[in-house]
C-alpha cells in the first residue's frame, strides 16, 4: 500500500485518546477522505504509530503539535525529534513543525514525500509568512502547510484567500480557531 500523501489530500484529522479510540474514529471516516491524521499530542496515553498504520489502509499522518504552535506536546526538542522520527520510521507520513529544525538536514526524514512541513501561528498570520512559506518549500517536503489564527471572519477569509496564489498542489494555507469555519 502506498503510504505517501495523495493530492488533493482530503484529510480527516482526529484526536484519539488511545488506540481503541483511534480504531473507533477511523471506522467513521468516509471513503472520500484519502488520508487519516492522528493528533497524538492530544492523546491521553501513548499510541504506537505502527499500530495506527494497521488500522486502515489509507495514508496516515502522525502529528505532535507543540504548545508553541497551538498543540499540547510539552516535551523537549529531543523528545519531539525522537517521536517524529519513530513515526516516520514506522512508515507514517509525519507533520513536522518547521520551527523544530528537524528538516534542516536533508538526511533527516529522507523520503520527503512522507513529510508535511508545517507552521501554525495561533495568534494570526506572521508578517514574514511568505518568507517562511518559501523556506518550508525549500525543504522538498511533500506538502507545506501554513495555518494562522483568525480573530474574526474577515481575517479568516483573508487567510483563506492566500491559497489562491499557491494552488500548486504542494501548499495549503488556511485559518484556525473559532472564526475559521467559513
Image (spheres, rainbow, N blue to C red):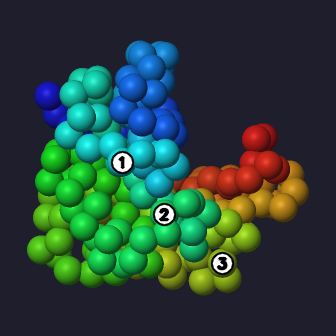
Secondary-structure class at tag 3: loop
Residue drawn 29% across the image and 23% down it? 56
**Could you say where residue 88 lies in the image, as x and y percent from the top left?**
21, 54
Q: Residue furthest front?
A: 45
Quarter occupied by residue 94: bottom left
Residue drawn 84% across the image and 61% down it? 151
Instruction: Give the side of residue 169 with respect to residue 84, left or right.
Output: right
**Could you say where residue 10 lies in the image, as x and y percent from the top left?**
46, 33
Say which mark, if any, is on residue 126.
3
Q: Closer to the camera, 159 or 23?
A: 23
**Residue under numbered circle 2:** 73
**Residue under numbered circle 1:** 46
Ranked by sequence position, the earlier of labels 2 and 3 is 2
Residue drawn 49% across the image and 69% down it? 74
Is label 2 or label 3 in front? 2
Ranked by sequence position, the earlier of labels 1 and 3 is 1
Say which mark, if any, is on residue 114.
none
Mark 2 Cα shell of 10 Å, populated few (<14), some (14-19), many (≥20):
many
Quarter occupied by residue 23: top left
**Could you say where residue 92 lies in the image, as x and y percent from the top left?**
24, 45
Mark 1 Cα shell of 10 Å, populated few (<14), some (14-19), many (≥20):
few
Ranked by sequence position, the earlier of labels 1 and 2 is 1
Q: Closer to the camera, 149 or 174?
A: 149
Q: Is residue 66 visible?
A: yes
Secondary-structure class at tag 2: loop
The quadrant the C terminus occupies is: top right
Amino acid at each position: 500500500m502506498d503510504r505517501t500523501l495523495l493530492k488533493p489530500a482530503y484529510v480527516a484529522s482526529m484526536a484519539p485518546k488511545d488506540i481503541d479510540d483511534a480504531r473507533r474514529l477511523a471506522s467513521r471516516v468516509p471513503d472520500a477522505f484519502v488520508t487519516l491524521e492522528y493528533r497524538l499530542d492530544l492523546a491521553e496515553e501513548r499510541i504506537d504509530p505502527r499500530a495506527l498504520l494497521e488500522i486502515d489502509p489509507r495514508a496516515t499522518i502522525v502529528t505532535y503539535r507543540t504548545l508553541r504552535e497551538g498543540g499540547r506536546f510539552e516535551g523537549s526538542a529531543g523528545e519531539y525529534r525522537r517521536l517524529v522520527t519513530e513515526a516516520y520510521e514506522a512508515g507514517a507520513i509525519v507533520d513536522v513543525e518547521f520551527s523544530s529544525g528537524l528538516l534542516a538536514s536533508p538526511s533527516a526524514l529522507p523520503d520527503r514525500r512522507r513529510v508535511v512541513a508545517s507552521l501554525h501561528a495561533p495568534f494570526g498570520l506572521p508578517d514574514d509568512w511568505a518568507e517562511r512559506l518559501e523556506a518550508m518549500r525549500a525543504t522538498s517536503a511533500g506538502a507545506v502547510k501554513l495555518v494562522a489564527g483568525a480573530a474574526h471572519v474577515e481575517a479568516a477569509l483573508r487567510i483563506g484567500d492566500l491559497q489562491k496564489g499557491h494552488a500548486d498542489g504542494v501548499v495549503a494555507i488556511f485559518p484556525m480557531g473559532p472564526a475559521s469555519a467559513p
